[in-house]
Image: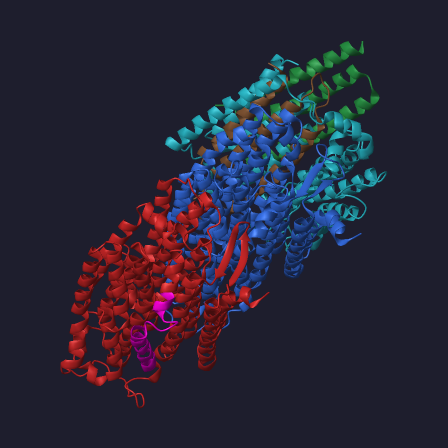
Chain colours: A blue, B green, C cyan, D brown, E red
Amino acid sequence: MNPGDWLAHWWPGLLLGPALLGGALAFVWPRLGFALGQGVALLNALAAVLLVWRVAVGGPLAHAAGGWPAPLGIGLRLDGLAVLMVLAAALVAWAGALNARSYFRAHGQAPEGFWPLWLFLMAALNGLFISADLFNLYVMLELTGLAAVGLVVLGGGTDSLAAALRYLLVGLGGSLCYLLGVGLMYGAYGTVDLPLLASQASGPALGAALALMTAGLFFKAGIFPFHFWLPPAHGGAPAPVSAMLSALVVEAAFYLLMRLWLELAPLSLAELALPVSGVLGSAAVVWGAVNALRAERLKLMIAYSTVSQLGYLFLALPLMPLAGAAIWSGAALLVLSHALAKGALFLGAGTVLNVVGHDRIRGLNGLAQRLPLTVAVFVLAAVSLIGLPPSGGFLAKWLLLNGAIAQGQWWAVAVLLVGSVLAGAYMFRVLGRCFTYGHTGGREPGVALAAQWPAFGLAAAAVALGLAGSWVGALALAGSPFEGDALLGVAP
Amino acid sequence: MFDALGLIFAAAGVALFVAGTAGLLRFPDLYTRLHALTKADTLGLGLVCVGAALHWGDPLIALKLGLIWLLVMASSTVLAHLIARAARRDGVRPWEAE
Amino acid sequence: MTASALDFVLAGGLVALGAVLLFSHDLFRSLVLFVVYGLLMAVVWVRLGAPDLALAEAAVGAGVTGALMLAAWHRLPAAGRRAEGVVSGPWALLSGVALAGVAAALIGVLAGLDAQREGGLQQQVLARLPESGVESPVTAVLLNFRGYDTFLELGVLLLAALLVRLGGGADFGLGAKSSSVLRGLADWLAPLLVLTAGYLLWRGGHAPGGAFQAGALLAGAGILLALVYPPGADGRPAGGPRAFARWTQGLRLRGLLSAGFLVFLGVALALLVGGNLLQYPAGWAGALILLIEAAAALSIGAALLVLFMGVAGGREAGAP
Amino acid sequence: MTLSLLYASAGVLLFCLGLFALAVRPHLLHKILALNVAGAGAFLVYLGLAYRGGGAAADPAPQAMVLTGIVVAVSTTALALALALRLGRATGRMELPDGSADR
Amino acid sequence: MTLENWLPALILLSSLLPGLLIFFLAEERHKTRTILNLGGALIKVALVLVMVGGVFAGRSYESRLTLLPGMDLVLNADALSVLLVTLSAGLWLVTTVYAIGYLEDSPHRSRFFGFFSLCVTSAMGVAMAGNMLTFLMFFELLTLSTYPLVVHRGTPEARRAGRIYLAYTLIGGAALLLGVVWLRVLVGPLDFTETGLLADHAGLDPNALRFIFILLVGGMAVKAALVPLHGWLPQAMVAPAPVSALLHAVAVVKAGAFGIVRVVYDVYGVEFSAELGLLAPLAAVAAVTIVYGSVRALYQDSLKKRLAFSTVSQVSYIVLGTAILGPVASVGGMVHLVHQGLMKITLFFCAGNLAETLGIHRVQEMNGVGRRMPYTMAAFTIGALGMIGVPPLAGFVSKWYLAAGGLDAGQGWVVFVLMASSLLNAGYFLPILYRAWFLPASVPWPRERAMPGRFETHWMLLWPPVITAVLVVLAGVLAAAPFSPLEWAQLIARREYGL
């Protein structure tokens, strides 16, 4: 059995086994939590890298859980987009686990329940990315949501509690919409398997079910105007948790939308419905950025930046059916680079919070002298979020612009450019403070580099993604509806 | 024969339930209402069970029905006891005719 | 089949009950009506040919959830017992109109669907039933065909138990004022419940019943015992069955909570050696399913007990 | 009107009622109740559509799904109640604080 | 894997790697930092000399990395690149020496020199970019790496200047990005081609092309400080003197002007641009900027601000030369790319010396300073006279060719613009020279440092302006010699016009 075959068979076990087992064991023996958390996060990252290699070399993978092929059983699949999401989640989770070690040291140790929840969240995200079964996705969404809410609660204090509860209620409302959509789908077409539905489903029930599921996912993704729960929840959680939530949990909902509308919905329906997503996305880009500009706390600013950056993704959705390959790859790159950059930003904000004692932006004068490495994290992350070359964010915006111009969608072009400039404004508002002479001492002693390196690694990866864009873009297309299309066309 | 007998038993049970319900609605205070309610739960349900057992005529089913009766009776009497106790502790005074 | 008058009454009553309980101004009445709603739902499940669901709904949907709600009511802060009416304003109006539109559209879609609905998976499930290791189709779907879902659902339950009991154990501050009569009842009712749970578990292989229903009964027994025995100096129950006291604390409780999940996970991963995730080898399906169900029933019972304690218990759930 | 359509429609109505109550009832216990009512409505759609007539057993697949859904619902309800009670203890009120986030 | 593939990349790495290493150096490690700085600069000069020789011998150099299919990162060396690369490499070496002398005892040196190196790397990238994408990347990187230099002082004014700088450049960058992507959608990969890449694409909508031209040139005009997009430049003079020197001479402003040259010559093609009617407006904007900048400079009392407005004016000579059809004017514009750099860096070095040694910031304070700092003021004088266009200094050569080119193309008004500008230049430079050399010092110098050794100021501050002043003279006197800037400019013009 050569290594490729071994991977092709064991991959669901690799993605779910360590995290779930580690999570349950960390629950039973809380003392092992730390070791399990570190070990499993590393293992998971290695597994993700291995699988990226496997998919890049050997193409998408599929697996029938229980040995029962769909529609009776539950289908799992690992195509290019899924494996990229798995990779992003694994990297952020690993960096977050490394960072959590020093983040919580300031408070003694990680609060009880942190490690099991962290590991369960990792597993749930992996499960969500690889599932091809609508009902299984519902269970995964709930698992993700529950773990995420639990992690937000760990922020402590009444604000976190209120944020967590609001997040939970909104998330459950969204899940119910999704659940009803799935029920309608099964009732009408007798299966909940995505590929089967894609080939069989048509008619008004499909539209109604998709609308319900989409509404639910809108809530979960926190797209404008359903974003009201997001900033307090992401701004109030412990920093490593915020990193994971902002980088991946909301993007997971977008990932599902991409699947639903591009693999399941017929083109005519997509063309009819997706402009809504474009309008909401445009509003989110501007609204999130404006609020990020007005935010007084660093973490809240980053959270609003998430609202804004998610807007780009929803903006890209209506462009996809026509300018397929470029936008699909662009969205994949954007998801990936946003995940890395946003993870880095939140981890950096956590370091600031621990060292400076607060995260009010006005009080960050001279931070570049105190925490140069963390400021470097902010700079690199800013490069990617604004979309400055040569970052992954730049390539993503390049592809989106390309697709938008090629289709003559000038409103999307305008929003993309305005959003970039606004992103520059709110990121440099912070960076400008960091470069003042407010702090006369030298580097902060006693800040473990271990707290800062993981964030730096993520931020550097977000920028370096731009250099691997060709490869990532091609990988994202593997197994997608646009496989084989040229990435960058020339207008006829 | 058994059917007719069963019907009579069941009808008697239902009558007791109706009476209990009427009591629940019309009696003046908590203690007297409990009094009415427990009659329905114990004797009323017992009569219905006997009627049902006669209707089916199967000893195994009769055994199950008996079990149901015993369990409901046990729980409802204890429940009535608890409610009355709690009411007394909370200082609910029994009703007295003017 | 067309609906009978009884069906109209049942369905209409359900909707009316839902509306009343959601928009009542008396919070306590809402809670009581919610339990009634659950029981009525169970009747509907029977009517729709789903006795498994009826059992689960009565035990979990109405029973445990209702108990949770009532327990929560007792711990509300004094100011929180009043229901604060309804938010009004343009947004409320807008959402009302939108939801009414959604309801009308969905019913329209359902009406269109009614004529040309596809068969679903029933035929396939029945065709493959002999290979599944159990005789009850619902159990076959739950633990074999879609076992992966059930496995994850145990994860959800475990996670909820973890979150609710953060910082606290199954707390026994509740039995302090219990009556000796109740204690006497509990003493012989609890074993009976455990016995019945075992019966339901075994029965699940070929008839309505199974791990969830059994777990709910186990939880009921646990809740009963926790409610009637007063706490000792160390917070553990002073009287009552020693084993119950030992197994609802600390490491053993955590072990119990995760046993079902861990056994399921172990089976799933072990089976990857020879086949797919959770693909039972021929001939082993029945035994493995029973093993998983037994462990799962214990875990579900423990988890539901912990959930109840987290809401009803004396100590702050989630407090550090 | 078929039995299927009747119950599924009732489910849709309950679902929408529940979501509406979730939006407009400020009391947290009402919100949690609303989620449960809406959830039961969704389950009713599953089972209504799974009905196979004449006392025959319903399609087992949606039954299994609803069973899963019920367990998920009780888990999330318990968590929501626990959090709501903690919030109630902390603020003295059983409502979410005003939606506007601090800056 | 040949030198031809690697040389452009190596030239970038020779400043990039030292820059990255310097970021991680502790403040106190003077020696290591100096070695890294000077070592990088010297290696870069050596590599550039190798490349100049190679290009002259007809070899072509190209480093290529594929980002996305059809989207390559290309660095290559054509004649135009070599002009700016050589200038940047040479001036970087000089500026590094100057900056070490200027900043070695102020705080945050590691950060400063790190960004300084990144800034030069970006300028090099701009110079060697082989297509629009690469150009855009380094252009934006330049924005990013100069921002920390502008706000380096950390004062409220510095932060304000930084904000203004960013607002201008980010919006300009967005316009440029839009233009590039749009053009990319229309014609595919945008490799720079001598005589213009659009020559191969007939039948495109001319209005779309005109609009794209406005986006591209508008985006670059922000950096080139064309009126009315010049607002950031006078603000940015709050930066330390070496930064101003670099910004005004080789990096930011020059990148903008160079970009306009690229767009007109290598993307649109100069003849096609004229055909679309784009050159006349561009020439008009340049002329307005020339006059406007000079007029504003007249009224500035702050020395650095006066120099900044002078830059606004002088950089537009390059644009003017580009916007006038005909090889002679092009030669004038391109040779001014080099000459303006040499002259302006001299002036800023001198201004920095005056501020650093004597604390002089304003023109009024300069009375009699020529006797106190004769070498510095001599260099300043040469730079100023060059700017005015006194023969045989470098500035004269540029203006001569521009005027001749204007007449050649039948656009006599250019001569008037140049004359007006020269008069204004004289108007704001000669009073300075007069004060410095002929008026007595009115008050004791505001702040006088301890006498640093035998020279009027530290040797690391003194030599750089003297060297660049000598170069200004040489560039004018030896304009006809081989390898002179003029010779290169003529070579470029021949190729761009396909002669």
Q: What number of labels is visible?
A: 0
Q: Which residues are magenta?
A: E461-489
Estimate the x, y position of residue E307 in percent, counting from the top left.
Answer: 25, 68
- Name the residue nearer the viewer: A26 or C219: A26
Q: Residue furthest right?
A: C283
In the image, taking residue B47 as reference, residue A239 lies left or right, namely left
Residue E484 forms part of the magenta stretch: yes
Image height check: is A68 above or below E337?
A: above
Residue displayed at 19% across by 71% down:
E429
In the image, taking residue A393 as reference, residue A143 lies left or right, namely right
- Name the residue nearer the viewer: B45 or A272: A272
Q: Residue furthest front?
A: E499
Tell me if I can see residue C249 in this picture: no
Image height check: is E176 above or below E366?
A: above
Estimate the x, y position of residue E325 in percent, counting from the top left.
Answer: 31, 54
Estimate the x, y position of residue C254 in percent, counting from the top left.
Answer: 68, 51
Q: Residue furthest bottom?
A: E454
Image height check: is E170 above or below E394?
A: above
- Name the residue nearer the viewer: C93 or E491: E491
In the image, taking residue C71 as reference, residue A319 lies left or right, namely left
Residue E389 forms part of the magenta stretch: no
Image height check: is E375 above or below A296?
A: below
**Residue E97: quarter of image:** bottom left
Estimate the x, y position of residue E496 in percent, counting from the top left.
Answer: 39, 57
Residue displayed at 50% across by 36% down:
D31
Residue displayed at 50% across by 31% down:
A271
